[in-house]
Image: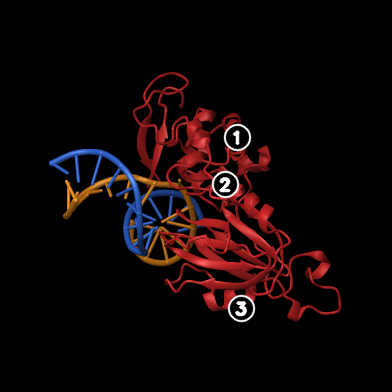
Chain colours: A red, B blue, C orange
Amino acid sequence: MPELPEVETIARGVDARVRGDRIVEAWFSRHREPFKSAAASQAKGLAGRPILAVHRTGKHIVCELGLAPAEDTPNARSLGQDGRAAAQWIVHLGMTGRLLVTDPEAPVVPHTHARLTLTSGRELRFVDPRRFGRLEFRDLEKREGFAGPGAEPLTIEATEFAALFRGRKLAIKAALLNQTLLAGVGNIYADEGLFHAGIRPRKSAGRLTRAQLEKLRVALAEVLNHAIRLGGSSVSDYVDANGVKGFFQLEHCVYQRTGEPCRRCGSLIRRVVVAGRSTHYCANCQR
DNA sequence: CATTTCACCTGGTGGC
DNA sequence: TGCCACCAGGTGAAAT
């Protein structure tokens, strides 16, 4: 479910409620590897660590963690070297993942795969029916910090954005979904961004003019920021860290509006398959 | 290497 | 009500 605006909304919500808290204990379900690091090593790595901050990178939620009291040295390294985090817990929600902050007595819903109990008494829970999500623990004393390979669509500049697509023959829609180029855009916002930029999804990425690419960059950033302001798109079951739905689905111009009139020109929205994904566009507004 | 296709999962929906 | 086909916001491995 979650693309950049949904992940950003969740990360902000989780940050607001668990920043400064401390992980007492972590529990993981046995359900086959919905994990990137083994459950046992994650549980061991997480226990006792303070949560310094929670933020988003691409479609990943990154929990910045300090040192557990036992390994804390008198050398003032409870925040790690230079006040930076000593470890990270990285959550990718896949299609149906949820990261929720709950009271401990809140019923444990089916497909709950992780429960982190916190000093405050609250719990951080990961729920994921389809199990496409991924959980990873990184000890920064041993490895490098997490940074997705793709550029951030909200801050990328014109020249760099244009360079991403130069010489690429594939459809612009397929290119937008490639997380190693641009991180955070998924099926909804690729379609919406292309609509606002007036570009056909199947147009070759490398054949777009510099002006079209710039229009696309701006359109994407506007759509994503607008969606963040509305708490994301709740297409079926997306909710934020507090279980609250978003409202951007009400503003969709093309996504899942097949056969409905275009909000700008009235012609009917079409659905095709590009890069194996449902793709929606207005043949009149997008050329 | 660039690009496309498919497998991975469960659950909801709509047709019959 | 039941059964079934189809669809779904994501990725990464395998095939081309």
Q: Of the numbered discs in the image, which one, if any, rests on residue A226?
A: 1
Label 3: which residue?
A: A44
Q: Position of residue C13 (x, y in %)?
A: 42, 66
> Quick check: do tags 3 and 1 share a chain?
yes
Tell me the CA gap for discs 3 and 1.
39 Å
Horizontal and vertical percent for residue A186?
50, 46
Left or right: A51 as drawn, with respect to A175: right
Give the number of the mark in front: 3 or 1: 3
Q: Are marks 3 and 1 in contact (CB under 8 Å)?
A: no
In the displayed orientation, state which residue is furthest to the top: A265
Say which amino acid is labelled 3.
Lys
What is the x, y in percent for residue A96? 45, 54
Closer to the chain start, of discs 3 and 2, is 2
The span from disc 1 to disc 2 (Cα, nearest Å) is 12 Å
Q: Residue at x 37, y 26 (%)?
A: A260
How far separated are the C-alphas under marks 3 and 2? 30 Å
Q: Quadrant of residue A139?
A: bottom right
Q: Amino acid at mark 2?
A: Leu
Q: Nearer the viewer, residue A120 or A142?
A: A120
Pointer 3 local density, CA inside 10 Å: few below 14, some 14–19, many at least 20: few
Q: Return the chain for callout 2.
A: A
Residue A140 appears in the figure = yes
Total count of labels? 3
